[in-house]
Amino acid sequence: MAIFEGAGVALVTPMNDDGSVNYTELQKLTEWQVQEGVDAIIACGTTGEASTLKDEEHIKVIETVVKQVAGRIPVIGGTGSNDTAHGIHLAKEAEKAGADALLVVTPYYNKATKSSLVAHYEAICSQTSLPVILYSIAGRTGLNLTPEMVARLKEIPNVQGIKEASGDISQIVAIATLVDDNFALYSGNDDQVLPLLSVGGSGVISTIANLLPKETSTMVHDYLKGNWQAAQKTQLAQLPLINAIFAEVNPVPVKAGVSLLGKCSMNYRLPLGVPEASTLANLKKAMKDYGLLAEEV
């Protein structure tokens, strides 16, 4: 059974001018997402700038989201690491903080052999009772979870799904043939949600949902209910905005978009920084065209 069906938002992490986490804005942003009808919140993923958070901040962000959500929807903590021992530590702490599940990216930079990759996930999963969603994004990590590897990893008892962000539809279809209803397939690419749903996917772990939580959730549920034309209309209408938020490395443009909505400050931690002027101008245009911003902004 899927941890959630629909749209889970990979939430941005609001920050103050000095780079510290703005927990007040995080609470407000979390509440807005819940009120808008998002189906799950993923805290401390790529979009949440987890790679530059200190461990105590990382866990406090998850804990803050958990407390604000108060059981209304699942909260999934991003706890992946290229150091297995560190990944175990984050998994344990996220479970203590009240997360409902974990998103565990493949080891980055040092990568892993096939056998050591299995050992990595087995070690982490043995130290938590929470469901684990694999996260495959070779463009970030240099390590692709092939269908063969997914077939091996899904045998670990608490591995219950995958966020598939390879962008390779053929690979996604191959993975879909190897899994059953006990393993959830989530799109990691906002422009490929419907193709993934068409082969049995459960939803999306979404970046665009930071700006369009209600629309993205409705799109997935429309498709799952058989209202395919409405879902297709939404998917295609979102494309210019999706292109705008991925014009630079994620989460730079999307966090700018959340800032333009007035829901967080446009602050980042180096090596990330504000988007280029042209990127910001294109983002504003895409948001205006979608109706998210007034023309005078």
Image: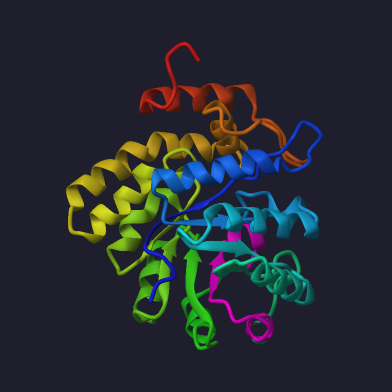
Q: Quadrant of the N terminus?
A: bottom left
Give the extent of the magenta segment: 117-144
Residue 10 pos. (x, y %):
54, 52
Residue at 68% x, 53% y is 61
The answer to which image quadrant residue 67 occupies is bottom right
Colouring used for the render: rainbow
Of 84 and 102, the residue lying toward us: 102
Residue at 53% x, 40% y is 246
The answer to which image quadrant residue 59 occupies is bottom right
Residue 59 located left or right of residue 9:
right
Residue 196 is inside the magenta segment = no
Q: Is residue 85 above or below residue 105?
A: below
Residue 215 pos. (x, y %):
34, 43
Residue 100 pos. (x, y %):
54, 69
Res 250 seen here: no
Residue 84 pos. (x, y %):
75, 76
Q: Is residue 13 above or below residue 159?
A: above
Residue at 44% x, 27% y is 287
The answer to which image quadrant residue 55 occupies is bottom right
